[in-house]
Image: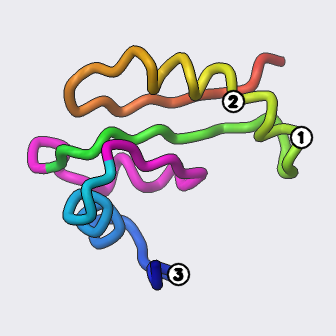
Amino acid sequence: MGWSGTKNGKLLALAESNGFEWLITLDDDLPPEQNWDTISVNVIVLKPRKQGKSSLYELVPKILLTINNPEPKQLSWITSDN
């Protein structure tokens, strides 16, 4: 899509303008920096217990639960069970 290196508000704007309903990110700095009143895309911030694919795979059931039960303009934090 050519979005590599795109960050924060510009990334959210691109997601919205391209019809995305959800943006899933590991960037926990993204939420505080945004004016959520103007954003219509839903955002999931992932907080795995450690880096690596296996930690992300553990979050998939929670991601699917969140996506399948959306609320308007949703901002969700999904963390690993410790």
Query: Label 3's element?
Result: loop
Q: Which mark is residue 60?
A: 2
The question of residue 10 being in magenta is answered with: no
User: Where residue 35 sits in the image (x, y, percent)?
Assistant: 17, 50
Is residue 15 placed above or below 23 in the rendered structure? Answer: below
- The kind of residue tagged 3 is Ser
Q: Which mark is residue 54?
A: 1
The mark that comes first in sequence, 2 or 3, is 3
Q: Tag 2: Cα neighbours inside 10 Å, few (<14), some, or many (≥20)?
A: few
Q: Is residue 26 left or right of residue 53?
A: left
Identified at 66% across, 38% down, the residue is: 47
Identified at 46% across, 78% down, the residue is: 1
Quadrant of residue 16 in the image?
Answer: bottom left
- Along the line of sight, the residue nearer the viewer: 32 or 71: 71
Q: Which residues, given as a range, are shown in magenta?
A: 21-38
- The kind of residue tagged 2 is Val
The mark that comes first in sequence, 1 or 3, is 3
Which residue bears the numbered disc 3? 4
The mark that comes first in sequence, 1 or 2, is 1
User: Where residue 37 sits in the image (x, y, percent)?
Assistant: 10, 42
Query: Label 2's element?
Result: helix
Quadrant housing the C terminus = top right
- Along the line of sight, the residue nearer the viewer: 75 or 16: 16
Is residue 17 placed above or below 78 in the rendered structure? Answer: below
Is disc 1 in contact with disc 3, using a CB cutoff of under 8 Å? Answer: no
Quadrant of residue 11 in the image?
Answer: bottom left
